[in-house]
Image (cartoon, helix red, strand yellow):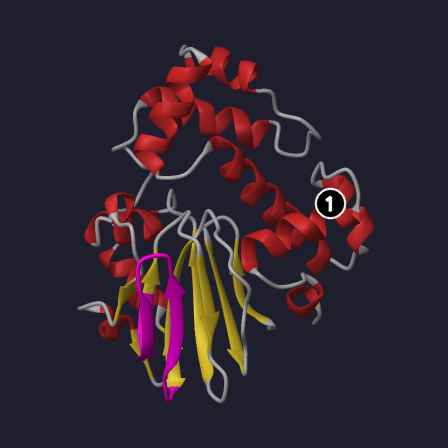
Amino acid sequence: MPIELFNINEGYTVFTESDYKTKKHMHYAIEIVCCKEGTFNVTTAVSNHTNITSVIIPSNLPHRFSCLGTTCNLLFLDPLSPLGSHFRKQYRLVSQNDAIANPPGLNRFYKNGNFNISWMKRYREGGTPADLDFRIRNCLQEIDARITDQSIPLSQLSEASFLSESRLSHLFKEQIGISIHQCILWKKILVAVVKAREGYSLTACAHYAGFSDSAHFCKVYARMFGINPFFVLKR
């Protein structure tokens, strides 16, 4: 599953995959899948979406994915990025408990077998996620500042956010739809992927991002994406 586009600053990654199948997994990112030809299947705890041509999978939704015999484009969006924020609000993803199969309006962003990121940007609401509580923004800034640390204690995030640990955890999940822990792991994975694409070994990337070793990184990655990172990081 080679990476076609990877923009950590704007919060999106595009993969193209053929004859692809995952185990059950969930991740911080919003996932948008469009089929180049044919159809694919997505299974959640709520539904078995078969023979579909596109889907939006909200953050933190356990699912399995299969595009055997066909080719799909997969777009992963940071829900706090301008693009992610647009889709999060447009499709009310925080309150969704299932994948949205063949979502209305998505086809305008997918033409000739590719996502049109430039066209998507015309619809985004831009800037920082102003709809978030300022204390959650403080928490996210603290996470970013410490993302390469092996441990980011909740107590430190609580102090930076002026909230108790329990209140911070609740408000974070309420506003973003995912736990603080999953957000941290996602950001660490992105840091490791950046280093890998610069030519560093998997072990070096894992240590740089604050994972205990490459096995820990691979385990977290597989839990997030349902596949081994070697399939993605190869160039």
Residue denoted by label 1: 216
Q: Is residue 52 above or below residue 225?
A: below
Residue 133 percent across, percent down from the top left: 30, 24
Q: Is residue 61 left or right of residue 192?
A: left
**Mark 1 residue element:** helix
| Location of the N terminus (image quadrant) | bottom right
| Location of the C terminus (image quadrant) | bottom right
The residues colored magenta run 37-55
Is residue 53 a member of the stretch shown in magenta? yes
The type of residue carrying mark 1 is: His
Evaluate whether residue 226 shows in this view: yes
In this rendered view, identify the residue nearer to me: 217 or 210: 217
Residue 202 percent across, percent down from the top left: 78, 54
Q: Is residue 148 left or right of residue 71?
A: right
Q: Is residue 136 above or below residue 23?
A: above
Q: Is residue 77 left or right of residue 227?
A: left
Tell me which residue sits at (31%, 64%) in the image. 47
Residue 110 percent across, percent down from the top left: 31, 75
- How crowded pointer 1 is (Cα within 10 Å; few <14, some 14-19, many 20+) is rated as some
Tell me which residue sits at (77%, 49%) in the image. 215
Tell me which residue sits at (78%, 41%) in the image. 207
Which secondary structure dominates the residues rendered in magenta?
strand
